[in-house]
Image (tube, rainbow, N blue to C red):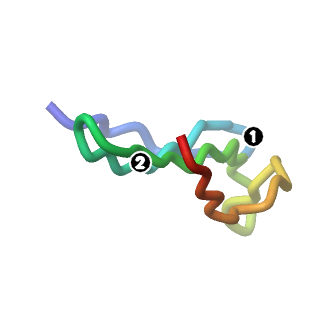
Amino acid sequence: SEDQTVFEPGMTVSVQPAIYLPGLYGARIEDVVVCTDIGARRLNQSPRLLTVTDR
């Protein structure tokens, strides 16, 4: 069943969209978001740049 929780100001969640190619690569963005009276606000300010490195 799906979560039916209604977000209220002050509630904080972790949002972690990801993509994985089994045996090859994976990438995930991890954000901490707080619900405010006027919407969501991302708490972490890390860059969202994709960094590719050789193995």
- Image quarter of residue 49: bottom right
N-term-proximal mark, 2 vs 1: 1
Graded by Cα atoms within 10 Å as few (under 14), some (14 to 19) or many (20 or more), the crowding at tag 2 reads few
Q: Is residue 5 above or below residue 44?
A: above
Question: Could you tell me which residue is drawn at 25 percent across and 35 percent down?
Answer: 23
Mark 2–mark 1 Cα distance, whole angstroms, equals: 25 Å
34 or 49: which is nearer to us?
Answer: 49
In the rendering, at what x and y percent does residue 29 appear? 57, 50
6 or 53: which is nearer to us?
Answer: 53
Helix, strand or loop at mark 1: loop
Residue that carries the numbered disc 2 in the rendered image: 18
**Residues at circles 2 and 1 in contact by the CB criterion of under 8 Å:** no
**Amino acid type, label 1:** Gly
Question: Could you tell me which residue is drawn at 68 percent across and 51 percent down?
Answer: 35
In the rendering, at what x and y percent does residue 20 appear? 31, 45
**Amino acid type, label 2:** Ala
Q: Is residue 31 left or right of residue 43?
A: left
Question: Could you tell me which residue is drawn at 62 percent across and 62 percent down?
Answer: 50
Graded by Cα atoms within 10 Å as few (under 14), some (14 to 19) or many (20 or more), the crowding at tag 1 reads few
Residue that carries the numbered disc 1 in the rendered image: 10
In the rendering, at what x and y percent does residue 2 appear? 21, 37
